[in-house]
Image (cartoon, rainbow, N blue to C red):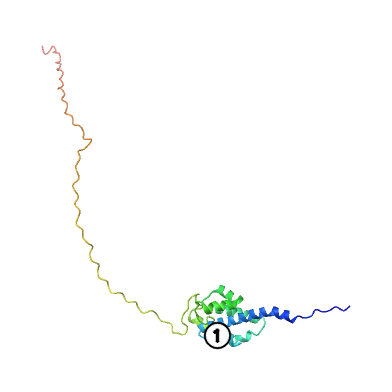
Amino acid sequence: MEQQQPEFDADLFLAAMIPGLVFGLVVAVFTVIAMWRLFTKAGRPGWAAIVPFYGTYVLLKIVGRPGWWLILFFIPIVNIVFLILVMIDLAKAFGKDGGFAVLLIFLPYVGMAILGFGSATYVGPVADPAFAARYGGYPPPGYAPQYGYPQQPGYPPQYGYPQQTGYPPPQQYPPQQYPPQQQYPPQYAPQQYPPQQYPPQQQPPQQQPPEGPEQR
């Protein structure tokens, strides 16, 4: 007996593929909108996000990488390495740290949406050697200097405020008069005794030495 091969159910295949296609289309549209906003923040045309290959070229210019890096994205395995480098540069270009670069690598549509619609400010092409030499390397996270304007040599001297007039003297109050304190007699005054009179001592009579024969 011949075994019957299962028939291919086209309806079941389409039913399984349609949710994946819809989800992929939503993610693609959301990523394009986020990149449009991100390009606009960086001073680039937003419509470049919907042009194949040109959008990648503009992204390289935003982070400060040379345009010929676009060729490296067509080489297998090599493109993954350079894509990671570009995502790290993109995080620094908007004042973010390495932790945000990890988000851009694994969830680029989420990271780009945060950069595009969040409060992040474009710092400049941080990977450009000219930019790095001008600002002493990568700027710290959150610092956003205005790229393209000449550096200010310094702030003008701060002039002092006019001297304020003295405050009025404090109000003088009359000295308070307190009544004199009552003097109390001493509680333990020493008792005065009259001096004692002693009788004079009697002097004993002086004995005369006996008369000798010569005095007789």
Q: Quadrant of the C terminus?
A: top left
Q: How many marks?
A: 1
Query: Which three-letter amino acid code belongs to the residue tagged 1?
Result: Lys
Side of 8 where 135 appears, left or right: left
Evaluate whether residue 93 shows in this view. no
Side of 196 where 63 appears, left or right: right
Quadrant in the picture for residue 85: bottom right
Residue 186 location (% of width, % of height): 21, 38
Residue at the spot 61% in from the left edge and 81% down from the top edge: 28
Which residue, as the protein is rendered here, is positioned at the far front?
A: 11
Side of 93 where 16 appears, left or right: right
Which residue, as the protein is rendered here, is positioned at the far right?
A: 1
Residue at the spot 60% in from the left edge and 78% down from the top edge: 84
Residue 214 location (% of width, % of height): 12, 13
How packed is label 1: few (under 14 Cα within 10 Å), some, or many (20 or more)? some
Side of 78 where 9 appears, left or right: right
Up-down relation of residue 198 to residue 212 (above or below): below
Residue 60 location (% of width, % of height): 57, 84
Instruction: Give the camera-side residue of 149 and 119.
Output: 119
Evaluate whether residue 100 shows in this view. yes
Quadrant in the picture for residue 188: top left
Q: Quadrant of the N terminus?
A: bottom right
Up-down relation of residue 145 to residue 171 (above or below): below
Quadrant in the picture for residue 157: bottom left
Determine the secondary structure under disc 1.
helix
Instruction: Give the camera-side residue of 81 and 106.
Output: 106
Residue at the spot 48% in from the left edge and 82% down from the top edge: 134
Instruction: Give the camera-side residue of 111 and 75.
Output: 111
Location of mark 1 (residue):
61
